[in-house]
Image (cartoon, rainbow, N blue to C red):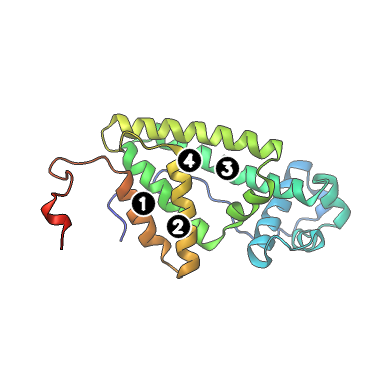
Amino acid sequence: MRSAGVADYSSGMSIPLLQRTKVAEDCWSALDAHEKRARLLRAAGDVFAREGLQAPMPAVAAAAGAGVGSVYRQFPSKRDLLAALVVERLQETERGAEAALAGEHDRWSALTGLLWMLAERQASDDVLGEAMATVSEHPAVAEALNETLVSLQRLLAAARSEGALRADATTLDLRLLFAATRAANQLQAGAWRRMLELGIDALRAPQPGRGAVSDASTHV
């Protein structure tokens, strides 16, 4: 079960989730460029989550209520569409990390709340993880990832300064943790929760009285 403090984190610190809404009734031609882009990204997220990254661009167009040509005017290639979707997800995480730094909760609670929210979303919709492997070298993705990692580094530093986070924890550890929760969920549905609990416990700073196990206790 989640520890106290995690539940109040609408991810613990209010990361805005990508809303899963039905395509609006508005006529496509009545939307401005920003609205068209937003609708296409929502539709793409839904389609790729449901059908996988192999889903064709016409499927995204249909889900958005747009013509295929309109999709390509916004995103010249499927790779660009996937990159834009990944960038949007990364920016949500970045905003969440910044919100955690500015929030009223202690930074450890904010950090663990963030981890719970991201892992839960990954378990139900792993578009980010799958797409990242495909477009990781896209310039826009590389830039967004770097900015996100900077914000996460700041959050880790704040949690470390409170004495709650182990001294050697890095953003690489967070990425390893999400790789582990993804693998656990593939092994058994729902197992990501146990993996996340173990990972968070490993990130926690050693507490007094929880030192190394004695030599005697290591032998059965």
Q: Closer to the N terminus: mark 2 or mark 4?
A: 4
Q: Closer to the N terminus: mark 2 or mark 1?
A: 2
In percent of width and height, residue 70 lies at 85, 51
Tag 4, which secondary structure?
helix
Measuring 45% from the left and 57% from the top, which residue is drawn there? 181
Marks 2 and 4: which is nearer the front? 2
Q: Amino acid at mark 2?
A: Thr
Q: Quadrant of residue 91?
A: top right
Q: Tell me the residue that label 2 is attached to.
A: 181
Q: Tell me the residue that label 3 is attached to.
A: 90
Q: Tell me the residue that label 1 is attached to.
A: 199
Q: CA distance from mark 2 to mark 1?
A: 9 Å
In percent of width and height, residue 6 lies at 34, 51
Q: CA distance from mark 4 to mark 1?
A: 20 Å
Marks 4 and 3: which is nearer the front? 3
Q: CA distance from mark 3 to mark 2?
A: 18 Å
Q: Are marks 2 and 1 in contact (CB under 8 Å)?
A: yes
Measuring 51% from the left and 38% from the top, which residue is drawn there? 95
- For residue 96, the mark is 4
